[in-house]
Image (cartoon, rainbow, N blue to C red):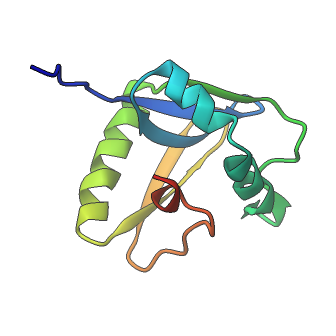
Amino acid sequence: MTPTLFHSIFTIEIGGKPTVTFEAKGLREANEICNAPWLKEDFASARSNGAPLWDGKAQLRARMGYADEIATFGDASKDAQQGCYWSISSNWTTMTAQRIPNPVLFPNSVEKRR
C-alpha cells in the first residue's frame, strides 16, 4: 500500500515581501521551485507598477504559507477549476486579492513545467 502524500501551501518572498503562494510536497520541493532558473526568469520579466517583480538581487525565500495566504490560495484554486483566476497584490502589511475572469499568465507558467 502506497502512503498518501498531502501537499502543503508555501509562499515565496522576494526581498521579504510575500509574492507567490503555491502547493508543494514539502519544504525541499518548495525551495527547488523557489530556486528554479525558469521561475527567476519569470520574476525578472514580470512587472509591478512598471518595475521588475525581481531585480535579480533581492533574496528569494520559500516558507510555509500563513493562514490568510492558505485561505486565499484555496479560494483561487477553486476558482481556477472554473476558469477564473486571481490577481494578488501585497504590501508590507496587507494582502489583497481580486478575481480576474480573463487572466494573462506568465509565459513560463508552472502548469507548463509539471
Residue visible at 55% across and 38% down in the picture: 94
Residue 111, percent from left and from top: 46, 59
User: In which image quadrant can residue 48 be found?
Assistant: bottom right
Residue furthest out toward the bottom: 102
Give the left or right position of residue 45, taking residue 93 as reference.
Answer: right
The N terminus sits in image quarter: top left
Residue visible at 55% across and 75% down in the picture: 104
Residue furthest out toward the left: 1
Residue 106, percent from left and from top: 60, 66
User: In which image quadrant can residue 49 be found?
Assistant: bottom right
Residue visible at 46% across and 41% down in the picture: 22
Tell me: residue 43, above or below residue 81: above
**Along the viewing direction, whichever of 99 and 111 lies nearer the viewer:** 111
Give the left or right position of residue 82, taking residue 101 as reference.
Answer: left
Give the left or right position of residue 32, taking residue 69 as reference.
Answer: right
Residue 90, percent from left and from top: 60, 45
Can residue 85 be seen here? The reply is: yes
